[in-house]
């Protein structure tokens, strides 16, 4: 549907009379500071709270232990976040609909076990075993989605059943021994074991990413100018590009101080960028936000709500399987405790801490990265200090509570702001 | 009356179980005219809108479009003819911005990627043509006022380039200034040569914006009035069905004394 609205137009009357003091439609280029203040006021906080939180966490742990911000620790952190981060990215998709997937921990454990059984016990080639494992995750998600969307069982219950059931399947796959060791030099082990040791790789990718962002923004501005549509100010684009350049080059510098760019981090970033593109720049992503905002409105517009619902669980299952493989790679084995413990809670907490709303309709893939950074930083800092994990749980719990409070308050602010 | 007849309903019947919601209803709408549909609660206004919009098909009767009888049994058949409906509960996605809501379900894509620039350009053009003022088309509609949300919903119905727009209580729950905005918009629709069928409870709004007033009472036609030549009392008595109402009662004694 791309027919332009025919333009010729009639005289305009203004029943309200008098001059209209409001600015004309779409005068978006305002003072950036004032725009930020307005966003704060209306409850669109975006990534601001989580970035501040991350900085605070880093400052506290660095002051407690000088090794916290060392290249070795940060490099380890950048690999540790990938497993949970992948799972959390899938959870973001489900949260965008205002639903929840409690099965992701079990599915990730099952994926690790399935890969180990296929590859080590049955001798299936690694590539094929990897593909089958990921597809199994997709299929599991499709099953959850079917029961939720078509049968009408609440997502909470479907995925709770999944949490128990898939964990049981994993235990029976692993059998009596309970642990299957993976090939130390194999493909999956390389996922978190490989580093691009040449310094040029990290710097090059940082520069490439920054340049890519700048070019994309620049092209967007030129198109907007030629179309006569309000656009971001030049200063804002330069500022954003500058921030990205500083962060990515600093990260590259730190990583190069140790072993170079980890392959795992690169794969994670590719997934984040790719899925963010899907969410913000494709029809499918727009459908997802629409269903998350108002199911009824989406249905009346003719969107296939059931399909969208099933698809997010498929994404979540797929990402859980991929995350499970990264977690297995970190310990080069599949064990009975794979995907157990507080993995599930951390994956969901990461998405929420990163700024994805529990109420649906608001969130981005980047919130998985930011949230998981916060959670893993706390875990790593506590481990460095040699304190009991009990402290880690309490701190993470408090951070999660703060994140949910911010989410609820900003939602309330938006409601209040909505009725002028 | 030079304007051609756009939509005509002839002898429409609709029954829900034991309730005869519509009985032998006639209605005509011409291009460039605003017809207000008024009536008491339960008079069948919403049912009639649903019949025209294809949500609930009529049991009996003929619907003529451009003078030819047509079948409207599903919403998309009505849309294909050029009938757009704006329901009372708007059906907007609060979390999407104005552009996202306008183009929801008919996004413009370029090589599989949403063409935000093109969609924003169309949106600004459309809002500008309709003299709608909006703080920014990139704000989530949750942060708009009730009147602005209503104008977004109406503007969205216009993207499909309809010839007839059905508005179900567009000014209910709006403040004075916001109501004025929406009524301005209805004027714009008429000036564009669209037919408008407007349901409203507010006779003030109706008198301000409509050309004709069709009254439904208990599922039947109870009068079709020219706004210019009809008094508010006549319309009210037609809605309530009371030839004997508060107004006539007050006048009655004086008339008797005179005699």
Image: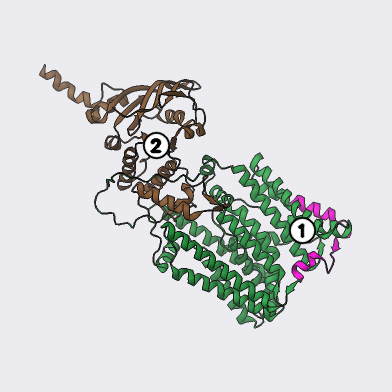
Chain colours: A green, B brown
Q: Position of residue B6 (x, y in %)?
A: 38, 29
Residue, x 35% and y 41% (percent of image)? B171
What chain does mark 2 sit on? Answer: B
Q: Residue A264, located in which quarter of the rendered image? A: bottom right
How dense is the environment of label 1, judged by Cα within 10 Å: few (below 14), some, or many (20 and up)?
many
Indicate whether A365 appears above or below A79: above
Q: Residue at x 22, y 28 (%)?
A: B229
Image quarter (top left, top right, bottom left or bottom right) of the C terminus of chain B: top left
Rendered image quadrant of residue A325: bottom right
Q: Is residue A52 left or right of residue A100?
A: left
Left or right of A186 on screen, residue A406: left
- Prevalent SS, magenta region: helix
Measured from the top left, where is residue B221 in percent x and y? 35, 22
On the question of residue A107 being in view, the answer is yes
Chain on which label 1 sits:
A
Q: Quadrant of residue A184?
A: bottom right
Give me the C-alpha separation between circle 2 and circle 1: 54 Å
Determine whether A7 is above or below A185 in the image: above
Task: Classify mark 1: helix, strand or loop.
Answer: helix
> Is B176 within the magenta?
no
Q: Residue A190 lies in magenta, yes or no? A: yes
Percent position of residue B64, x then y: 42, 24
Nearer to us in this view, A80 or A100:
A80
Q: Which residue has dot 1 on it?
A: A109
Question: What is the magenta range?
Answer: A164-193
Which residue reaches farthest bottom? A66
Picture coordinates of residue A47, whole percent (x, y): 53, 65
- Which residue is depicted at the point 44% across and 46% down? A4
Which numbered tag is attached to residue B167? 2
């Amino acid at each position: 549907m791309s027919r332009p609205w025919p333009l010729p137009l009639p005289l305009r009357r203004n029943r309200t009379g008098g001059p209209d003091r409001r600015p004309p439609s779409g005068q978006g280029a305002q003072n950036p500071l004032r725009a930020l203040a307005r966003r704060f006021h209306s409850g669109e906080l975006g990534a601001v709270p989580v970035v501040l939180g991350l900085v605070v966490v880093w400052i506290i742990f660095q002051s407690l232990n000088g090794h916290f911000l060392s290249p070795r620790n940060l490099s380890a952190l950048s690999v540790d976040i990938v497993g949970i981060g992948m799972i959390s990215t899938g959870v973001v998709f489900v949260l965008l609909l205002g639903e929840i997937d409690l099965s992701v921990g079990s599915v990730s454990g099952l994926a690790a076990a399935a890969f180990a059984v296929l590859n080590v016990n049955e001798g299936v080639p690694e590539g094929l075993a990897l593909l089958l494992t990921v597809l199994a995750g997709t299929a599991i998600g499709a099953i959850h989605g079917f029961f939720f969307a078509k049968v009408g069982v609440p997502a909470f219950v479907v995925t709770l059943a999944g949490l128990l059931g898939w964990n049981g399947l994993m235990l029976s796959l692993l059998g009596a021994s309970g642990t299957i060791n993976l090939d130390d030099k194999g493909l999956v082990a390389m996922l978190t074991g490989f580093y691009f040791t040449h310094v040029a790789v990290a710097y090059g990718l940082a520069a490439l990413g920054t340049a890519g962002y700048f070019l994309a923004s620049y092209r967007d501005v030129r198109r907007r100018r030629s179309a006569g549509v309000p656009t971001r100010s030049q200063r804002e684009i330069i500022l954003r590009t500058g921030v990205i350049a500083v962060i990515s080059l600093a990260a590259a510098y730190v990583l190069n101080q140790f072993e170079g760019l980890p392959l795992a981090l690169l794969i994670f970033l590719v997934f984040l960028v790719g899925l963010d593109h899907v969410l913000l720049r494709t029809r499918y992503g727009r459908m997802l936000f629409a269903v998350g905002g108002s199911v009824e409105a989406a249905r009346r517009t003719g969107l296939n709500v059931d399909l969208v619902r099933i698809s997010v669980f498929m994404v979540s299952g797929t990402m859980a399987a991929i995350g499970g493989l990264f977690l297995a790679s970190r310990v080069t084995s599949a064990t009975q405790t794979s995907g157990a413990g507080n993995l599930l809670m951390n994956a969901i907490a990461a998405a929420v801490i990163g700024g994805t709303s529990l109420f649906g309709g608001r969130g981005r893939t980047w919130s998985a990265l930011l949230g998981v950074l916060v959670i893993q930083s706390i875990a790593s800092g506590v481990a460095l200090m040699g304190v009991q994990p009990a402290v880690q749980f309490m701190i993470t719990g408090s951070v999660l509570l703060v994140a949910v409070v911010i989410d609820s308050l900003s939602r309330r602010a938006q409601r209040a702001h909505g009725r002028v | 009356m030079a304007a051609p007849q756009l939509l005509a309903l002839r002898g429409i019947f609709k029954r829900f179980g034991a309730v005869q919601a519509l009985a032998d209803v006639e209605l005509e709408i011409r291009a460039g005219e605003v017809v207000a549909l008024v009536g008491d609660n339960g008079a069948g206004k919403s049912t009639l809108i649903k019949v025209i919009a294809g949500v609930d098909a009529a049991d009996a009767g003929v619907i003529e479009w451009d003078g030819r009888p047509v079948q409207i049994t599903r919403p998309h058949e009505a849309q294909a003819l050029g009938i757009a409906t704006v329901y009372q509960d708007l059906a907007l996605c609060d979390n999407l911005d104005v552009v996202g809501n306008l183009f929801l379900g008919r996004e413009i894509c370029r090589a599989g990627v949403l063409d935000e620039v093109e969609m924003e350009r169309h949106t600004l053009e459309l809002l500008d043509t309709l003299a709608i003022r909006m703080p920014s088309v990139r704000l989530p509609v949750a942060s708009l006022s009730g009147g602005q949300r209503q104008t977004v919903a109406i503007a969205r119905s216009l993207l499909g380039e309809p010839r007839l727009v059905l508005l179900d209580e567009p000014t209910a729950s709006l403040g004075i200034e916001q109501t004025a905005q929406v009524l301005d918009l209805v004027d714009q629709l008429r000036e564009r040569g669209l037919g408008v069928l407007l349901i409203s409870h507010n006779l003030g709004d109706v008198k301000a914006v409509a050309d004709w007033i069709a009254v439904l009472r208990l599922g039947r036609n109870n009068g079709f009035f020219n706004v210019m030549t009809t008094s508010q009392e006549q319309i009210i008595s037609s809605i309530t069905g009371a030839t004997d109402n508060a107004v006539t009662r007050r006048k009655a004694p004086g008339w008797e004394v005179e005699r």
